[in-house]
Image (cartoon, rainbow, N blue to C red):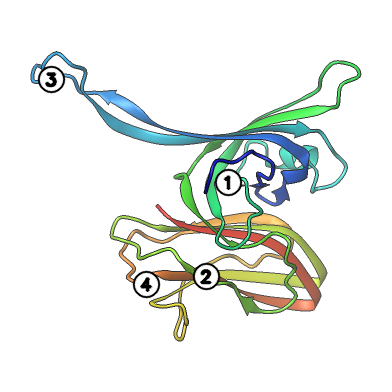
Amino acid sequence: MPKTILTNVRCFAVAVDLTSQSNKIELSAEVEDKDVTNYGSQGWKDVIGGLGSAEISGEGQWEAGDPSRVDDASWAQFGGVGPWSISANNAAAVGDLAYFTQALRSSYKVGEAVGEVAPWSSTAKSSWPLVRGQFAHPPGTARTATGTGTALNLGAVTAGKRLHAVLHVLSAAGTTPSLTARVESAPDNTFAAPTTRLTFAAATAAGGQALRTTGTAITDSWWRIAWTITGTAPSFLFVAALGIQ
């Protein structure tokens, strides 16, 4: 990806697409440096990596009055942990770079001086590793029937690593709609005999979920999202991202 001007950063917070309500999204990650300096350190400080953490901060234009608006969503999520996914200045199409984690909505601020556009700002702090992966399902494609997503060559999962997956259900319509999404893997892109690695809980309304594998090695290198939809005239908008960390 070449140098870029930030014009299309996508931010998905649990069940809400904040893209059209935000004008600044920042993502930071750090690892604690722990001092292990000793008499063998030759007069130089010696450090090792401790605990890692990540933080998402955002701000934009305040809106309220619907669960998809930033004020309603922020109050509903405040103090809770859920999935967050950030695009790297792209449209969140399948295969686009994604950064995602589970995060605690830890702060929310509104208000400004008279005559100003009403702003908001908020912070979320990681409760999971920050994963650098790819979007596996785009936000703007409505699904009304059972299907499978596009295959992604994420590579094999080595022992001690995990395949992480997040699902943002942005909307659900119809009579008794139900969406059960799962993560499948295969040794090649034909998916002739896919293996289900993770299955999300059935979703009947907007919401967010995150899952990961156990840490055992998986030799399959191809991955995709698949889903089962039931109900009368069901329709779902959802976003998914996958990555190995």
- Pointer 3 or 2: first along the chain: 3
Q: Amino acid at mark 4?
A: Asp
Q: Which residue is mark 2?
A: 224
Residue for point 43% across, 71% down? 222
Q: Amino acid at mark 2?
A: Arg
Circle on res. 110: none
| Nearer the camera: disc 1 or disc 4 | 1
Q: Which residue is mark 4?
A: 220
Q: Amino acid at mark 3?
A: Ser
Q: Is residue 11 left or right of residue 73?
A: left
Q: Is residue 83 left or right of residue 217?
A: right
Is residue 19 depicted above or below 169 in this figure? above
Query: Marks 4 and 3, Cα distance to the nearest angstrom?
Result: 43 Å
Q: Is residue 164 left or right of residue 58?
A: left
- Pointer 2 or 1: first along the chain: 1
For label 3, the SS is loop
- Pointer 1 or 3: first along the chain: 3
Q: Which residue is mark 1?
A: 88
- Pointer 4 or 3: first along the chain: 3
| Nearer the camera: disc 1 or disc 3 | 1
> What is the tally of numbered marks visible in this picture?
4
Residue 118 at what x, y percent from top left?
84, 27
Circle on res. 41: 3
For label 1, the SS is loop
Q: Amino acid at mark 1?
A: Ala
For label 4, the SS is loop
Residue 138: which quarter of the image? bottom right
